[in-house]
């Protein structure tokens, strides 16, 4: 019960890594504030948490809208009276698969708004609360796309590189306030987003597996283990780190 009575705020909790992280935090004693734009998926996650007797509240949230982020995080702080851990997980991929010169402006604006501005908006509000209490841990979800080139995905790669830069900057700024900020960089992980990517291009599933030395795609549990470790006091001397959870791909 290493997170006993701690309040954990998670964006993108309706499915995938966000849902899996919420469930594991709850099993280890945390109180959960979960958010997502997908109301039906969010309610499913909430029901799963209630079934294991978790103290949970859900909030409809579009992280690309600053006023919504500010309102929801303020509500979380008011409803629970504290904020100990924040997992900024909400993210999307591009809908096209073009080289940079053909990449659409709509896709660029949409991906950057969620993956980059959304993380900034959340950190802005989370850090204001945590720094007042001189304690807290923030984990941002970046990607291997934040560590290397991802051809035909300029917006996604740019947004995930930005997450790492923002993580390092905030970590240095807020270390003296007792707040730690780290990032996790997953490889292709079994999730609805990955299945959507595979369905768009025949043979991609078989092709990409050969780029991972450990010979498999990531599981949500692989990513969640890293998230919880970075959120726990066991990693209290670690901040500004971007951890690849990638089966050796970036190596």
Image: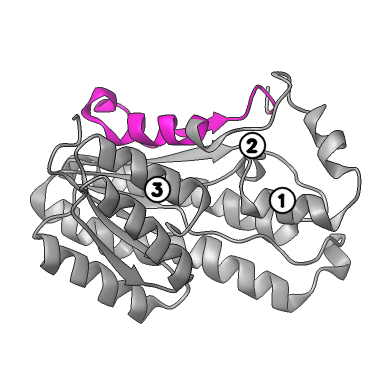
- Residue underneath mark 3: 169
Mark 2 vs mark 1, CA separation in Å: 14 Å
- Which residue is pictured at 76% across the width and 46% down the height? 150
Place of residue 209 in the rendered image (x, y in percent of width and height, measured from the top left): 79, 30
Mark 3 vs mark 2, CA separation in Å: 23 Å
In the rendered image, residue 246 lying in the magenta stretch gets the answer: yes
In the rendered image, residue 42 lying in the magenta stretch gets the answer: no
| Mark closer to the chain start, 1 or 3 | 3
Query: Is the residue marked by circle 1 packed among few (<14), some (14-19), or many (20+) residues within 10 Å?
Result: few
Q: Quadrant of residue 139?
A: top left
Mark 1: secondary structure: helix
- Residue underneath mark 2: 187
Place of residue 75 in the rendered image (x, y in percent of width and height, measured from the top left): 19, 72
65 and 16: which is toward the camera: 16
Q: Vertical placement of 85 versus 200: above or below?
A: above
- Left or right: residue 50 versus residue 65 is left
Q: What segment is highlighted magenta in the picture?
A: 222-249
- Residue underneath mark 1: 195
Query: Is the residue marked by circle 3 packed among few (<14), some (14-19), or many (20+) residues within 10 Å?
Result: few
Q: Quadrant of residue 175?
A: top left
Q: Does the rendering let one see residue 168?
A: no
């Amino acid at each position: 019960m290493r997170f006993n009575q701690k309040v954990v705020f998670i964006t993108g909790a309706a499915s995938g890594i966000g849902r899996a992280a919420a469930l594991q935090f709850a099993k280890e004693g945390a109180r959960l504030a979960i958010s997502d734009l997908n109301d039906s998926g969010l309610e499913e996650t909430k029901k799963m948490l209630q079934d294991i007797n978790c103290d949970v509240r859900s909030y409809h949230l579009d992280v690309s809208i600053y006023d919504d982020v500010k309102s929801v995080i303020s509500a979380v702080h008011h409803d629970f009276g504290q904020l100990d851990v924040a997992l900024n997980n909400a993210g999307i991929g591009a809908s096209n698969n073009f080289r940079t010169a053909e990449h659409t402006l709509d896709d660029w604006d949409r991906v950057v708004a969620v993956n980059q501005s959304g993380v900034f908006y959340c950190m802005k509000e989370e850090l204001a609360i945590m720094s007042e209490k001189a304690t807290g841990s923030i984990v941002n979800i970046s990607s291997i796309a934040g560590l290397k080139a991802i051809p035909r995905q300029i917006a996604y790669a740019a947004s995930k590189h930005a997450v790492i830069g923002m993580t390092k900057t905030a970590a240095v700024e807020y270390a003296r306030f007792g707040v730690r900020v780290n990032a996790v960089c997953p490889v292709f992980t079994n999730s609805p987003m990955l299945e959507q990517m595979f369905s768009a291009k025949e043979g991609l599933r078989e092709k990409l597996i050969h780029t991972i030395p450990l010979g498999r795609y990531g599981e949500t549990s692989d990513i969640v283990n890293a998230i919880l470790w970075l959120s726990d006091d066991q990693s209290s001397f670690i901040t500004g780190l971007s951890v690849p959870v990638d089966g050796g791909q970036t190596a």
